[in-house]
Image (cartoon, grey):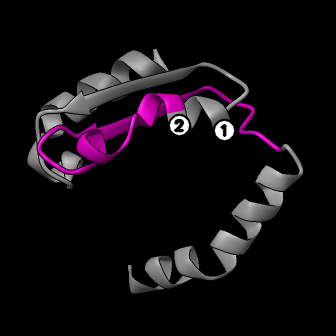
Amino acid sequence: MCEDYRAAATIDLHHDRESRAAGVKVQCPMLALWGAKGNIGKWYDAPTIWRQYCAADVTAAAIDSGHYIAEESPQATLEHFNHFFA
């Protein structure tokens, strides 16, 4: 897990900036979920942001949980997954 955070602040960030500068977008449908009790919905318009980076459809929703949606609201998370992958 710590390696993921390290990469996000270093090489991943570099690659993301290169991709954005080149106009590269995610080509497959995207499911973006976040916890309604967390800060993402307070700080950002997550659906709008992800639609800027995705050339395909973006399905976005806040789940009634904090940051750890799968652990805090597993049933709601699973329902979103089942609907998205149906």
Residue 10 within the segment the image draws in magenta: no
Query: How far across and down, in percent of the image, does residue 51 sit?
Result: 59, 29
Which residue occupies 34% across, 37% down?
33
- Look at the numbered discs 2 and 1 and tell me whether their residues touch, using CB distance below 8 Å: yes
Question: Which residue is label 2 attached to?
Answer: 49
Height in image: 4 above or below 30?
Answer: below
Residue 66 placement, left or right of 30: left
Q: Is residue 34 above or below residue 80?
A: below
User: Which numbered circle lies on residue 20?
Assistant: none
At 85% from the left and 43% from the top, the residue drawn is 23
In the image: residue 64, left or right of residue 42? left
Q: Which residue is mark 1?
A: 53
Q: Amino acid at mark 1?
A: Tyr
Amino acid tagged 2: Ile
Asked which quadrant contains residue 63, the reply is top left
Task: Tell whether 18 sits left or right of 61.
Answer: right
Where residue 5 appears, as percent x and y from the top left, is 45, 78
User: Which of the two residues, 20 or 54, is positioned nearer the viewer here?
Assistant: 20
Local crowd size for mark 2, using a 10 Å CA cut-off: few (<14), some (14–19), many (≥20): few
Check disc 2 and report its element: helix, strand or loop.
Answer: helix
The foreground one among 79 and 39 is 39
Q: Is residue 25 left or right of residue 75?
A: right
* C-alpha span from label 2 to label 1: 7 Å
Q: Residue 6, percent across and down? A: 50, 85
Q: Which residues are magenta?
A: 24-48
* Total numbered badges shown on the rendered structure: 2
**What x and y, as percent, mark residue 22?**
89, 51
Q: Which image quadrant is residue 74 in?
A: top left
For mark 1, does the 10 Å Cα neighbourhood hold few (<14), some (14 to 19), or many (20 or more) residues? Answer: some
Could you tell me which residue is drawn at 74 percent across and 62 percent down? Answer: 17
